[in-house]
């Protein structure tokens, strides 16, 4: 079956993982085979989703066989990527190289690339009706869509060519005969294997270029076909991130299907008329009414400017971290 793909993006901490999980839980409960790919869920949410290890293969939820869960782990994904695109000896040398480990796990673009690559594998498996992809916190915005091209550029780009030379046959032989002894000599003065290890890493990484570049094009095609939803709250910083996303997305993908204003206060609070309450409580209610009005205005302005579907998800007193709460979270039309 062809999977419908929903990419859940947005600024850090706005509720991407929560909304992605709730969407998956509710779609699965409606009888559709669903996979949610989460990134770094908080402990209680991970427990509720039945996650035991990070970076594992998708597994069905113990309480709902329609709900499948996978967790991304950039380090594991990059080991798999190295083994897929480099020949076996080079791949093992790469995964053991400390610069490879640092470059692939610490940089936002490589985390995004790993997430996009894994998501593409799951989409290609055609085993789910819906695949919901939570995106890494550091790259909740447009970076997720631009990561494949950025990665191909990095691996095959000018900097690396300049550092390692063109892809001449025998380049490695030359390196072993000429550069390596020089780097070793420098390293022995520095008292480490630093330069030699860096050079080796760059040379090895470069051999993955053809595979990475080809894959990047496939990933981009998937991302262009996917639906994206942007999560935000009514606070200025996440809204600014959502705006940036709306402006930049048309260049790389389809327009977002919806924007979700999460943790929203009910509009009914704006004109609530409390009965007889103490002056302190009345003042407090007035303050909340003002905040509810401000949020409604932010939403209205966003909808007018970007003519997008707007979904309001209410602020829950108790953060939705168990299965029941995720099933009950009002997604107002997002699921189904
Ligand atoms: N509708 C809601 N009502 C109340 N609390 C919520 C709601 N949605 C999310 N939360 C809480 O907000 C916090 C952040 O949510 P979540 O981890 O889903 O955000 P995120 O966007 O995935 O964050 P990150 O960018 O760090 O990955 C969590 O404590 C979560 O339980
Ligand atoms: Mg998250």
Image (cartoon, rainbow, N blue to C red):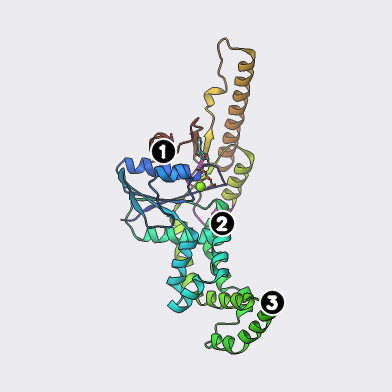
Residues tagged 3 and 1 counted as in contact (Cβ below 8 A): no
The structure residue drawn at horizontal position 33% and vertical position 44%, both measured from the top left corner, is 28
Of marks 2 and 3, which one's residue comes earlier in the chain? 2
At horizontal 45% and vertical 79% (from top left) the residue drawn is 89
Residue 311: image x %, image y %? Answer: 48, 37
Give the residue drawn at x 38%, y 35%. Answer: 324
Percent position (x, y) of residue 259? 51, 42
Q: Considering only vertical position in the picture, is 108 above or below 50?
A: below
Q: Which residue is mark 1?
A: 322
Asked whether mark 2 and ligand 1 are closer than 8 Å, the reply comes as: no
Some atom of ligand 1 lies within 8 Å of the CB belonging to the residue at label 3: no
Neighbor class of circle 3 (other Cα within 10 Å; few <14, some 14-19, many 20+) is few
**x%, y% of residue 256?**
50, 48
Task: Name the disc covering residue 190, or none.
Answer: 3
**Label 2 to label 3: alpha-carbon separation:** 37 Å
Which residue has dot 2 on it?
143
Q: Is residue 173 above or below residue 218?
A: below
Q: Residue furthest top?
A: 276
Q: Which quadrant would the C terminus be assigned to in this image? A: top left
Please tell me whether residue 233 is drawn above or below residue 144 in the rendered image: above
Q: Are marks 2 and 3 in contact (CB under 8 Å)?
A: no
| Highlighted range, magenta | 248-260
């Amino acid at each position: 079956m062809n999977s419908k793909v929903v990419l859940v993006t947005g600024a850090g901490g706005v509720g991407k993982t929560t909304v992605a999980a709730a969407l998956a839980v509710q779609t699965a409960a409606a009888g559709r085979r669903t996979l949610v790919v989460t990134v770094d869920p908080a402990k209680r949410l991970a427990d509720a989703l039945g996650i035991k290890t990070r970076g594992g293969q998708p597994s069905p939820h113990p309480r709902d066989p329609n709900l499948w869960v996978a967790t991304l782990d950039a380090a594991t994904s990059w080991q798999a990527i190295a083994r897929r695109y480099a020949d076996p000896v080079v791949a093992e040398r790469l995964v053991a190289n400390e610069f490879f480990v640092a470059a692939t796990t610490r940089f936002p673009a490589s985390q995004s690339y790993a997430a996009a690559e894994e998501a593409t594998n799951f989409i290609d498996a055609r085993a789910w009706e819906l695949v919901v992809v939570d995106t890494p916190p550091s790259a909740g915005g447009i970076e997720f869509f631009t990561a494949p091209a950025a990665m191909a550029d990095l691996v095959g780009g000018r900097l690396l060519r300049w550092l390692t030379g063109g892809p001449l046959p025998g380049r490695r032989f030359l390196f072993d005969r000429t550069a390596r002894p020089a780097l070793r000599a420098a390293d022995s003065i520095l008292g480490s294997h630093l330069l030699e290890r860096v050079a080796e890493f760059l040379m090895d990484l470069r051999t993955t270029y053809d595979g990475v570049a080809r894959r990047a094009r496939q990933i981009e095609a998937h991302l262009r076909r996917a639906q994206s939803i942007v999560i935000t709250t009514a606070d200025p910083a996440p809204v600014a991130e959502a705006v940036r996303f709306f402006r930049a997305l048309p260049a790389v993908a389809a327009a977002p299907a919806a924007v979700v204003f999460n943790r929203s206060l009910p509009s009914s609070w704006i004109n609530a008329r409390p009965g007889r309450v103490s002056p302190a409580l009345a003042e407090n209610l007035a303050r909340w009414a003002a905040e509810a009005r401000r949020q409604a205005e932010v939403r209205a302005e966003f909808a007018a400017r970007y003519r997008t579907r707007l979904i309001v998800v209410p602020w829950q007193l108790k953060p939705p971290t168990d299965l029941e709460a995720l099933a009950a979270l009002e997604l107002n039309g997002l699921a189904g």
